[in-house]
Amino acid sequence: MKIQRQISQKAYHADHSFMGSYQKLIKDTVIPYQYSVLKDEAEGAEKSHVIANFINAGKALRGEDAGDGYYGMVFQDSDLAKWIEAAAYSLTSFPDPELERTADEAIGLVAAAQDEDGYLNTYYTIKDRDKRYTNLLEGHELYCSGHMMEAACAYYEATGKDALLEVMEKNMEHIYDYFITQGHEGYPGHPEIELALMKLYRVTGNEHAKKLAEHFINVRGVDPHFYEKEAKKRDWTVWNANPSDYNYMQAGAPVRKQTRATGHAVRAVYLLTGMADAASEDEDASLLAACERLWDNITKKRIYVTGGIGSTFMGEAFSTDYDLPNDTAYCETCASIGLMFFASRMLENQVRGEYGDVMERAFYNTVLAGMSLDGKRFFYVNPLECAPGISGISPTHRHVLTTRPGWHTCACCPPNAARLISSIGKYAYGENESTAFCHLFAGGHVEFGNGLTLDCETEYPYGFQVKYTILKGNGGLALRIPGWSKTHSLLLNGATANASMKEGYAYIQVRTGDVIELLLDDQPYRIYASSRVPRLTGCTAIGRGPLIYCFEGVDNGGDVMGLSLKREGVLTVGPAAPGLPPSTGTLLAEALKAEAMNGLYSQKPPAQTPVTATAIPYYAWCNRGENQMRVWMPTA
């Protein structure tokens, strides 16, 4: 039984606030731009061929010539699925007949690419129909189905149209028949379908969806040698993945016995999201205990200060505890999105401030950094340090790009960010029969299913007053008090509220007409790392509110590598930096700047000059050309 649950997509309507401005950017720019990429019409962007793949798959099923065949990664179908999902969420806030027609047309192409038995995957339909489900390690068929199931649920909830929902329920029944009725072995190489099946179950009430999700969760790792056995039965591969690297696939042990987050970071948090969802739905204590252990391992030993996860480019993966390099960090945008999914589902099991804190840190920093401020360029990797000339060039740093591309060959992150931002209300607010929960501070209008209706007004993350006006209803209101806020005050109709604190949330009773004001700490702060993180010894990061700040060359004479923050130096709030939106705040820090040396080494220490260094929010870096950048600074 869920302690609380996400609100429906239609329950939240953003205002002109920070969240609203981002949702409008997704609607006005990101969604149309990304669709032009999927159709290979965006000038200068990496070729996608996604729409053409669906068209060609439909032709192949009709016995026609499949045009120019298949192009792209084996999981290319998922790009369209996430785009449809983003479009669906956007339509709930910004009704748009033209966008809806475009989405309907895309859904028609998906339906035409589905085989009679319910199978759906353009890669195998066009190229290798006889190889279905023979390479679960690399084939991503179940991953693609999962994303399209999520799209189907979102589009049905947004528009009431069930064409895609019918397609994906048929696809689910096909998968159910193969793995459960027929009893074929296996589980997804790339988890995702688990969380999608739980969504499909809630929308359709189809018990097969829930049973299939539980099946994939329960069989995972029971036979850790499954992928080795699978590989011996075939003479082909997609990218030569190692079938013996059990931990990379989160398959080294049954999920209930796993104690460390291992392997590909996105796969790990997608799996954990499905596990946490199933745990709350089934009241499964052992599954929840596993989620808690793995949550603790990630958030106490394997997470970056920016909310990024996945420290190595070798497999886009977790490495080991406390291994958090700055300049070679991977921190895939999708991984932080998946971490938000996991946190949101953990909140449905237990309302704890730490889940909201991590969700907030990931969103405002790594997730938003994955997209340029104009919505047309995207990072896959989100480092905490960038040095042009080394980053993007050295073999150990080649994955760390110094500018955002317009698209990627592996383009999972851009549409993932679009769907997350468009649906942020579901992560910001939750509900049960008696209480409305405010997990994130998102300005706008919210109509909870329990009868409570409120308006939220705030300039967060740059303003630290959050005002809630209760428009209708009586009941409980639970507000997360962020862990970064050293002080706070809570007022009810101008007087100190009689609130009870529990696990990082303030609970108060409200009724129609009440005005609640939450005042948070607006002071900049310093962050220090454990000595167990060797690369951060003697370094300091700075933040204000949920935002982590970084130092970029354009604001600091072109060079941030020679800067050191004064140990007792003052931090102050500064004006917006040139070239960034006026609302974008800065922090000013007392620092020392080392004079550049002529040679590579010297026995003479470089002269240092006192300076005022300027830091910008991490999410806003790399919007003014190629620059040096650092989050963690030496302290002098």
Image (cartoon, rainbow, N blue to C red):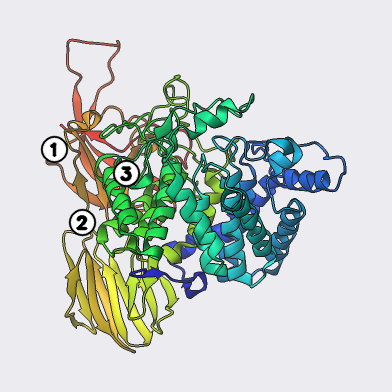
Decide: is 174 above or below 220: below
Q: CA gap, disc 3 to disc 1? A: 44 Å
Mark in the foreground, 3 or 1? 3
Asked where in the image residue 502 lies, by quadrant, the reply is bottom left
Q: CA gap, disc 3 to disc 2? A: 43 Å
Visible in this render: residue 191?
Answer: yes
Give whichever of 373, 500 is nearer the camera. 500
- Amino acid type of disc 1? Arg
Q: Residue furthest front?
A: 182
Dot 1 falls on a residue whose secondary structure is loop
Residue denoted by label 2 = 523
- Amino acid type of disc 3? Lys
Residue denoted by label 1 = 567
Q: Residue at x 31, y 84 (%)?
A: 475
Which quadrant is the N terminus positioned in? Answer: bottom left
Give whichever of 163, 379 is nearer the camera. 163
Asked where in the image residue 206 lies, by quadrant, the reply is bottom right
**Which disc number belongs to residue 257?**
3
Tell me whether the residue at label 3 lies in contact with that at label 1, contact meaning CB atoms closer than 8 angstroms. Answer: no
For label 1, count other residues whose C-alpha is less than 10 Å away and answer few (under 14), some (14-19) or many (20+).
some
Residue 364, x across and y down, in percent: 38, 53
For label 3, count other residues whose C-alpha is less than 10 Å away and answer few (under 14), some (14-19) or many (20+).
some
Which quadrant is the C terminus positioned in? Answer: top left
Residue 291, x across and y down, in percent: 33, 51
Visible in this render: residue 28?
Answer: no
